[in-house]
Amino acid sequence: MVLYGYTIGDADINPSQAGEQFAVYRFPISPLATTPQKVGEITAANINNAELEGLGTNPITGRASAVNEARGPNLTPGAVIRVNNVDQPFAPASASPTPTPSDLRRFGFDSGADFGRDYSVAGQPIVLYNISGDAETPVGSSLYKITTANPGTVTLVDGFGAPTTAAQRQGTQPTNPGKHADGLAIDNLNPGRTRALASDFTTGDGDGNQLYKVDLLTGELSAPITLRTPSGQALNVDLDSGLSFTNSGSQRLLAFLENGSVYEITGYQDELAASGLGLGSATGSNGAGFATATLLGTVNLPSASTGAIDYEGFTIVNE
């Protein structure tokens, strides 16, 4: 078995061909190989807001799925599209989950996703969680869950504080104001409602590079866990991100940035293991509220170095 990372470009791979074709790539993780393999293309013409930025691997089936970004640049709320089986063997199929309630629209522009247990339901079935964030004004994020049926349903995860407002349901206001996140990783080796992390590698929202613990029952994000370089300085990159656990064997947490850079994150274990949404013990390896991000290398994806194509979604599959 080999661990592979998967990502999807956000622009047409072949402009001379009719329609838009978004390419799906995979690359070995252990050790990291910087030359990717194209495994297929997704026809994006029928996908509203077709940037497939949320990628997750189902722990039951071992297959990867993708979720489109929340809203396009014209601020028009877009349909939620889930694209299944974007891993190897490549056989994508799309579904449009039904919004519940009917006026539900996702907040934000950026999107991250991963599969995990639904802690609001007896038996805790597997669902696809989607975090949607907006690094502009107003800054914030909201968590959603998509059932695995076809087409399934999508609902807002919001069980903390005041009742959900119409603006939050309709995607114009976040449920986590002031906390932008666009990557999501759920621990399925040691499951729990707060065994999940979201990532923010942008600085345009006025803060630094961070992780947040995520409560999968309430949708709440913790106070930030600051990312540092191995030398102890604050990490300072400004790129959209994907986040994934290996969830196999010796567990690792990896972040993938839109230019193909891959970081391994360590020192988060105390924070993740702490009960609730606290930030762990001050006696941890990096102290409370800190983790270390180490650059492992950069995957050589077409047009990533120029910014013509961004690669924001990321998941890891054991094949």
Image: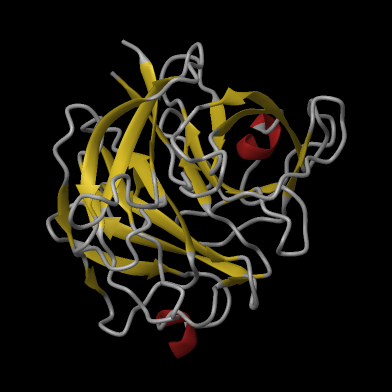
> Image point 22% across, 47% down: which residue?
42
Find the residue positioned furthest to the bottom. Answer: 166
Locate residue 95 relative to residue 239 in the image: left or right: left
Q: Quadrant of residue 313?
A: top left
> Image point 22% across, 65% down: which residue?
153
Regarding residue 23, the answer to whether it shows in the image is yes
Q: Position of residue 222 (x, y in %)?
A: 66, 55
Locate residue 237 relative to residue 200 in the image: left or right: right
Colour scheme in use: secondary structure
Nearest the eye: 242 or 292: 242
Q: Please, is residue 43 above or below residue 156 in the view?
A: above
Q: Quadrant of residue 283?
A: top right
> Image point 54% across, 73% down: which residue?
175
Q: Please, is residue 177 above or below residue 231 in the view?
A: below
Q: Please, is residue 166 above or below residue 149 in the view?
A: below
Q: Position of residue 233 (x, y in %)?
A: 87, 35
Regarding residue 114, the answer to whether it shows in the image is no
Q: Position of residue 227 (x, y in %)?
A: 75, 40
Nearest the eye: 127 or 65: 65
Give the position of the N terminus as an image quadrant. top left
Tag count: 0
Locate residue 285 relative to residue 43 in the image: left or right: right
Give the position of the C terminus as an image quadrant. top left
Nearest the eye: 111 or 152: 111
Q: Position of residue 129 (x, y in %)?
A: 38, 53
Locate residue 132 relative to residue 82 in the image: left or right: right
